[in-house]
Image (spheres, rainbow, N blue to C red):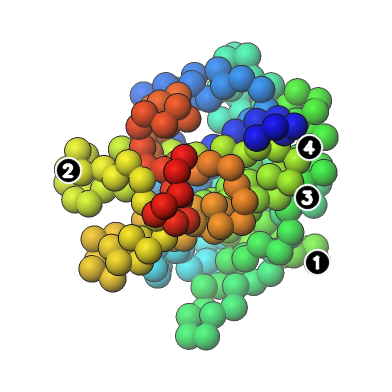
Amino acid sequence: MPGKIKLFVVKIGGNIIDDDVRLSEFLRLFAALPGAKILVHGGGKLATDLAEKLGIQQVMIEGRRVTDESTLRIAEMVYGGLVNKQLVAALHPLGCTALGVCGADGDLIRAHKRRHPTIDFGLVGDIDAVNAPLLDRWLGQGLTPVIAPLSHDGEGQLFNTNADTIAQEIAKAMSQAFHVVLVFGFEKNGVLLDMNDEKSCLTQIDFESFQELKRREVITRGMIPKLENAFSAVRDGVGRVIIGRAELLPQLIEGTSGTSIVWDRHENY
């Protein structure tokens, strides 16, 4: 894309964070990415394990966590504290000057409590705005933001917020000034037609195919919101969106691994 600098926005989920070997390899590859980059992370099993130890029941609906006040406190401690700072500390010796933040820091991510006609998700935030100029300034200073999945409403209320959603909203906001490559890195090769067969990975998926596979229940649970976020990004102008194995980050970016997300099946990457 002429005139635009490339920006990598990479999201990693809990199954990578929970695996020390996979996480170490991913962080090495992420730190080696040239130029501007942003890392968005989920929380891993630590939050669920802590909730169980404290006797706080966790409820998931449509792949999304219901968040009461106790669960939010756990998210603040684990996502915004422990996981975020461990990632930041691990990136520095790899030559990556990381800055660990959540959506409340610098008024980075404004949100409102999720509104749903039939489900109360609790203190879960849906994003209203991303402070793109602040991210631009940090990137211009050579910093790599590492963003925890928390947002706020500007009135003192924090929200647990889906990390995939944060990644796609950041990618969309930054695509005004950058050519953004958005990568959803997780433990699978990409979008699979058979969850038990890594070789069934689709090299590309369009929105119509996604709807059909969801209807047939080939795509289910947590993959549904992940793909909804991916399609929202490509629909709204993000340069490239890829889903795949986090430890294969260079191959995902090169297009030799993972699943590329396109809006229309006739679109050609």
Quarter of the rendering containing residue 265: bottom left
Give the answer, above or below, for where 167 lies relative to 221. Answer: above
The image quarter containing residue 128 is bottom right
Residue hosting label 2: 197
Question: Label 4 vs label 3: CA separation?
Answer: 9 Å
Where 133 sits versus 225, above or below? above
Label 3 element class = loop
Q: Residues within 10 Å of mark 4 (few under 14, many from 20)?
A: some
As drawn, which residue projects farthest toward the front? 266
Q: Position of residue 77 (x, y in %)?
A: 59, 48
* Inter-mark Cα distance, 3 to 2: 40 Å
Residue at mark 4: 136
Pick whichever, 136 or 23, lies toward us.
136
Q: Is residue 50 visible?
A: no
Q: CA distance from mark 4 to mark 2?
A: 40 Å
Give, as a three-letter code, the residue at label 1: Glu
* Label placed on residue 155: 1
First-in-chain label (1 vs 2): 1
